[in-house]
Amino acid sequence: MIKRISAAILCLILIITAFSGCLGNKKTGASFSMPITDEPTSLDPQIADSNSEKMIVLNCFEGLVRINSHGEIENGVAEEYYVSDDGLTYTFKLRDNAHWALFSGHKSVIGENYKDTFDINVYAEDFEFAFQRVFDEHISSPYTEFFSCIDSFSAPDRHTFIINLKYAYDGFLRLLTLPGAMPCDKEFYELTGGKYGLDAKYMLCNGAFNASKWTEGTSIRIVKNDDYNGVNTINPASVTFYINSSDDMVFEKMLAKTYDAAFINHDNYKKLETSNADDYDSTEILDTVYTFVFNQANKYLENKNIRLAITHCLNLENISESAGGLKPAKGIVPEFCKIGDTLYRDINQGYSTEYNEALARELFEQGLLEIGASSVEVEIKCTEEYENSLKQVIQTLQKILGVKFVVSVNVMSASELTAAVSDGNYSVVFYPFTASSDSADDFLVSLSRRNLFGYNSEDFNAAIEQIKVSKGNNAELINSCIAAENVLYNDAVVIPVLFGNSYFITNKKTEGIYFYSSPSNVVFMQALKK
């Protein structure tokens, strides 16, 4: 069975195996496993940035509020909260039984008598310290931009935390479910001597689970937090996140029932459909856009007319057919991204390449004159599943641009492709950009942070800054996002080609594993298993 995150919905997906609501013979106290694509460098919530880091942090920590299995905001450490009539002041009243989880590994940090000497209560001051760290320029937290709407915050007493905003923002409570908003105990943080979040013993967790064992290069195990007193019962005994960057190996281990849940790519899902689909529940996530990325440092591709010539040789419908039916892209922002509660691609259909052979040849000849070259030689790097599609693209390019355009395909693994892009070791790549959240503006801002294509444009930088200052006003934010996209298209820096997808699959022997808004937000607290 497959559910799709598409046109009308993208909030939260609850993966279950029995839609009747009956738990059947599934039971609590089971252990679960799931692959993560890379090993975290830190599980410090105020620093955690990769999907793997955020996934583990969000299972081990709890903020003032959290998102439940119905996609709704519910109380976390806060037992109640109030929003002022003008929407600028949020007052949170914390419950008095929110606790940090201590285990034997903390002896080396806190001391032999850690259970008797350390105050395990979570206080408002822990949230105050967390936000101080978010805005500390020495920390370089990735969440500073997300919380730029905050004007001030304070903890007037141990069970009251107040946040004042610069402007009213309807989505603010959801921001408080990000890792950066998780509490941080100042005493413990200082006792780690700069190692906070670098190992299980240097983590102090207050969520459904606490970090138990971090085996470098292999796995991270989290176990049920017996001191958790939140609104939900914790079902699993443990979850182990295995480090596995190979899409094919992840798929094989899902088939072998080694993993209980995983994200798989489009190609492997097609294999699943033909063989073992009845053993799994699946949800399609329209979170990826496949693009041609031009290296601006390349002596040929630094010329805009050369890039535009290539663009006008692309027939997206033909590429779509040869790539297994993936849809032609209508922009750089993936389909599941939203502004507010509205899908961005419903607002802005965005970009579509104009297939124009005559214009392509004209621009190409002009580009050759401008760079003083008699020919252009480039290599397109891609992964194996798109090799045949790109060979057809090459045939079209050479047919239109002639012998002066020399192009080849270099096939490599996904990890090799990512490394080549990170190192700037490419001329052209067919590269998948996958959104890490369902926010269209965050996706565009992330492109500016990653700067994968050596692109430096005052217009694009200005457009990104306008996105940042438009938060809180959806009409302005939409216009700012459209402007940023248009800069990329007009400069022919990144050419959207196909909309792709990934799939979240779970073994039908499991129930209650859910995720919301992005692949980093997978929640195990309600998981059950036969």
Image (cartoon, rainbow, N blue to C red):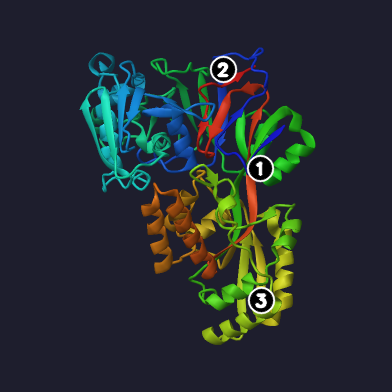
Q: Which mark is first along the chain, 3 or 2? A: 2
Q: Nearer the viewer, mark 2 or mark 1?
A: 2
Numbered circle sitting on residue 248: 1
User: For the residue marked with disc 1, what is the amino acid?
Assistant: Asp
Q: Residues within 10 Å of mark 1 (few under 14, many from 20)?
A: some
Question: Farthest residue toward the front?
Answer: 85
Residue 176: x and y in percent read 38, 35
Q: Residues within 10 Å of mark 2 (few under 14, many from 20)?
A: some
- Please report the residue visible at 64 percent of the width from the left and 83 percent of the height from the top: 362
Q: Residues within 10 Å of mark 3 (few under 14, many from 20)?
A: some
- Please report the residue visible at 63 percent of the width from the left and 72 percent of the height from the top: 310
Q: Which mark is first along the chain, 1 or 3? A: 1
SS state under label 3? strand
Q: Give the image quarter of residue 106.
A: top left
Q: Which mark is first along the chain, 1 or 2? A: 2
Numbered circle sitting on residue 73: none
In front of the other: 418 or 92:
92
Q: CA distance from mark 3 to mark 1?
A: 32 Å
Answer with left or right where residue 347 lies relative to residue 132.
Answer: right
Residue 434: x and y in percent read 55, 49
User: For the residue marked with disc 2, what is the amino acid?
Assistant: Ala
Position of the N terminus by quadrant: top right
SS state under label 1? helix
Residue 387: x and y in percent read 70, 59
Residue 50: x and y in percent read 46, 43
Numbered circle sitting on residue 30: 2
Q: Is residue 224 visible to us here?
A: yes
Q: Which residue is mark 3?
A: 406
Q: CA distance from mark 2 to mark 1?
A: 26 Å
Q: Give the image quarter of residue 284.
A: top right
SS state under label 2? loop
